[in-house]
C-alpha cells in the first residue's frame, strides 16, 4: 500500500472514531407533549388534558429514617389500565393502548416551580400472538421511523433475540426436529445523548451523557403465519427522558437533606 493510501485510510479511521464519540443528543426534549423543565402546575394541567378520565396520583419525598412521607411533592403518575398474561385490561383510557406515565419533579427548595427532570412512559400495544388484528400503525418500522423523526438518529443501539426455537427430541431412539417456531421476538434498545456508549451501557447513562438524554426499550414480535409476512409489531415501548443537570441538582439536594437530618438526629 502506498504512503498516500495509508494516509487516506488513517484519516478515514480517525474521522469515524471522532464521529462515533459524538453524543447524538435527542432533538426533542419531550415525550407525548410532556417536556423536561416544565413546572409542576403545567405538568398537572397537561395530565388532566391528556388523561381526563384517569386518576392522577401524587408522590412525596419520604422523611429521612422513617416510612412516613413529607409534604414535598416528588412526582405525578398515571396508569390507564392493567396488563396480565399479555391480556390488556382497560381502565380509564378509551384507546387500544395502555400507558403508564411517571413525571419526577425537582424539590421545591431548589426551584419553587418544581420543574420536571425525568419523564418515563411505558406503552403496551398488544401481542400479535393473541391479537391478529393489531393495527398497521403499531408496526415496528412505523414506530421506529416516528422516533427517529422526532429525536434524530440515536448514538447507540442494541438488539437481543428473546424468543427461542424448540429443541430437537428423540422418539424411539431417533432424533426428530421440533416444529418450526412461529413466534419470534426481540428487545431493541436505542439511546440518544450517550457519548461513546458501548452495548453494555445502553440501558442507562452516567457521566458520559450530555445535559439530557433519552433511552427507548422496545419489545417487537412477529408471527410467520400472519400477513403481511416478515412484519414485526411493537408489543411495548419504554421511553425515559432525563435532564442530567436538574437530576444532579435533585441528587445534591437529597444528599444535603439527608445530612441535615443526620446532624439533627446526632444532636
Image (cartoon, grey):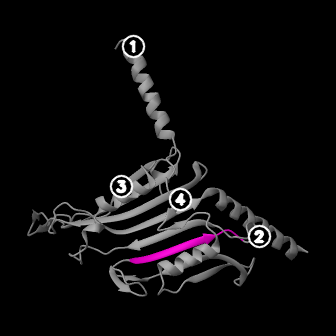
Q: Tell me the crowding category of disc 1: few under 14, some 14 to 19, or many 20 or more residues within 10 angstroms, Cα based.
A: few
Residue at the disc numbered 1: 4
Q: Residue 133 location in percent, x, y? A: 21, 76
Report the number of discs.
4
Quadrant of residue 136 within the rendered picture: bottom left
Q: Are the two marked residues, 2 and 3, in contact with CB atoms closer than 8 angstroms?
A: no
Judge whether residue 184 is colored magenta. Answer: no
Q: Secondary structure at mark 2?
A: loop
Residue at the disc numbered 3: 159
Bounds of the magenta segment: 98-107
The relative height of residue 72 versus residue 199 in the rendered view (above or below) is below
In the displayed structure image, the side of residue 188 where residue 215 appears, left or right: right
Lower position in the chain sequence, tag 4 or tag 1: 1
The structure residue drawn at horizontal position 73% and vertical position 81%, both measured from the top left corner, is 70
Q: Secondary structure at mark 4?
A: loop
Judge whether residue 103 is colored magenta. Answer: yes
Cα separation between marks 3 and 4 = 25 Å
The structure residue drawn at horizontal position 52% and vertical position 45%, both measured from the top left corner, is 23
The structure residue drawn at horizontal position 61% and vertical position 82%, both measured from the top left corner, is 58
Lower position in the chain sequence, tag 4 or tag 2: 4
The numbered dot on residue 210 is: none
Q: Tell me the crowding category of disc 2: few under 14, some 14 to 19, or many 20 or more residues within 10 angstroms, Cα based.
A: few
The numbered dot on residue 29 is: 4
In the displayed structure image, the side of residue 248 where residue 30 appears, left or right: left
Q: Residue 142 location in percent, x, y? A: 30, 61
Cα separation between marks 2 and 1 = 62 Å
Lower position in the chain sequence, tag 3 or tag 4: 4
Amino acid at each position: 500500500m502506498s504512503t498516500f493510501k495509508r494516509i487516506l485510510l488513517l484519516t478515514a479511521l480517525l474521522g469515524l472514531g471522532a464521529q462515533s464519540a459524538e453524543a447524538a443528543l435527542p432533538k426533542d426534549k419531550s415525550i407525548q407533549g410532556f417536556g423536561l423543565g416544565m413546572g409542576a402546575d403545567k405538568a398537572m394541567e397537561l395530565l388532566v388534558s391528556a388523561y381526563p378520565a384517569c386518576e392522577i396520583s401524587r408522590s412525596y419525598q419520604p422523611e429521612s429514617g422513617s416510612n412516613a412521607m413529607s409534604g414535598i411533592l416528588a412526582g405525578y403518575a398515571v396508569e390507564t389500565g392493567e396488563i396480565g398474561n399479555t391480556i390488556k385490561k382497560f381502565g380509564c383510557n378509551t384507546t387500544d393502548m395502555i400507558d403508564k406515565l411517571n413525571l419526577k419533579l425537582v424539590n421545591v427548595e431548589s426551584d419553587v416551580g418544581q420543574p420536571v427532570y425525568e419523564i418515563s412512559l411505558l406503552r403496551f400495544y398488544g401481542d400479535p400472538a393473541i391479537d391478529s388484528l393489531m393495527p398497521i400503525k403499531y408496526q415496528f418500522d412505523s414506530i421506529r421511523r416516528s422516533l427517529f423523526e422526532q429525536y434524530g438518529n440515536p448514538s447507540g443501539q442494541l438488539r437481543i433475540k428473546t424468543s427461542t426455537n424448540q429443541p430437537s427430541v428423540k422418539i424411539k431412539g431417533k432424533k426428530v426436529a421440533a416444529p418450526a417456531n412461529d413466534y419470534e421476538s426481540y428487545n431493541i434498545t436505542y439511546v440518544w445523548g450517550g457519548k461513546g456508549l458501548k452495548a453494555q451501557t445502553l440501558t442507562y447513562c452516567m457521566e458520559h451523557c450530555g445535559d439530557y438524554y433519552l433511552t427507548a426499550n422496545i419489545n417487537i414480535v412477529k408471527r410467520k403465519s400472519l400477513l403481511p409476512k416478515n412484519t414485526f409489531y411493537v408489543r411495548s415501548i419504554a421511553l425515559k427522558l432525563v435532564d442530567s443537570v436538574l437530576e444532579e441538582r435533585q441528587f445534591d439536594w437529597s444528599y444535603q437533606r439527608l445530612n441535615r437530618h443526620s446532624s439533627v438526629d446526632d444532636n
